[in-house]
Amino acid sequence: MSGRGPVTDTQISRRTLLVAGGLTGVAAFIAACGTGGTAATPSGTAAPTGTPGASPTDTPAPTPKPTTSAELNWANWTYYMDVDPNDATKFPTLENFKKKFGTTVNYQEVIDDNDAFVGTIKPQLQAGQDTGWDLIVLTDWMAARLIRLGWVEQMDLGNMPNVTANLQDVYKGVTWDPTNDHHVPWQSGMTGLGYDKAKTGALTSLAEFFDPKYKGKVDYLTEMRDTIGLTMLKLGLDPSKATRADVDAAIAEIRPMTRRSRRGSRPTSTTSARSRERPRS
């Protein structure tokens, strides 16, 4: 995401996408992300309607009434679903959904980096093949990229009453999905910093995370919007108006503090520059 504010603001924040329909209207996305070996319709190519060879005056066959999928494969980030306090392997919201609709949901917390995850399915998306996933949760900037590339199919909002009834105005009409029919918000949050006060004492400014005494003990996320944006704030620069020179200055500021580049988003050091925001509803 682009460093935008939390859900209470009038903008959309990080990791805010469930790139799929409401669970009862997910079929529109399945063909783009891949399902059952069925290739997606190429971007810009309209799927044929009616009977092959029929004249223009023939009446197209009625669209079959959609049914809830018997099985869904869902890829998500870690800690983005409510957990049963008595059983960490169960998710109450998911359990309630499965009980209500009788759908088997293969829920896996396998996303820890937008680029890394999309890299695992990009070849299939480019070829219009099955990715193995029906639902994926991505940060809005990555979801926007997939939509612009034509890898996400249009959804039928008529089959998604939960979305049309509950989607707040602040999430409607985004530039990369102005008709709100290629994605659904999942969760929202904000960028934060975490540190062990018992070992560091109170840290009161971004500059303290760049103290040489913490060299090699600060974890930076791989996503540019997190790490570069945060460092730009430390330098007094505005991430929303970043120039190439600003980015280069941020990288130069980070480089002396690092031992090696890290992939992922789980800090293990004493002091952590961290951003773990939830995708939107």
Image (cartoon, rainbow, N blue to C red):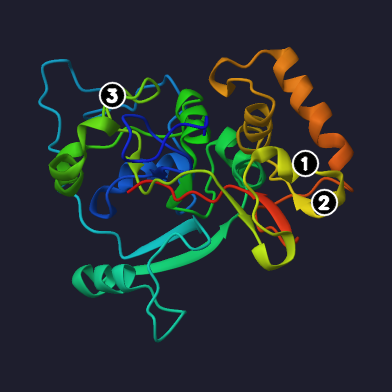
Q: From this view, report whether residue 227 is shown above or below residue 195.
A: above
- Secondary structure state at the residue bearing disc 1: helix
Mark earlier in primary sequence (3, 2): 3
Residue 51: image x %, image y %? 23, 30
- Residue 149 falls left or right of residue 134: right
Label 1 – label 3 distance at C-alpha: 39 Å
The answer to the question of whether label 1 and label 3 lie on touching residues, with beta carbons closer than 8 A, is: no
The residue singled out by tag 2 in the image is 214
Task: Residue 83 in the image: state x and y as whole percent.
Answer: 40, 73
Callout in the foreground (3, 2):
2
Label annotation for residue 210: 1
The amino acid beneath tag 1 is Phe
Q: Image height check: is 241 above or below 121?
A: above
Residue at image position (43%, 37%) is 13
Answer left or right for 73 relative to 227: left
Q: Earlier in the sequence, mark 1 or mark 3?
A: 3
**Callout 2 amino acid:** Tyr
**Location of residue 194 in the rendering, given as x and y in whole percent from the top left corner:** 61, 55
Is 65 in front, or is 204? 204
Q: Badge 1, how many Cα within 10 Å: few under 14, some, many 20+?
A: some
Give the residue drawn at x 62%, y 17%.
Answer: 242
User: Label 3: which residue?
Assistant: 173
- Label 1 or label 3, whichever lies nearer to me, is 1
Q: How many marks?
A: 3
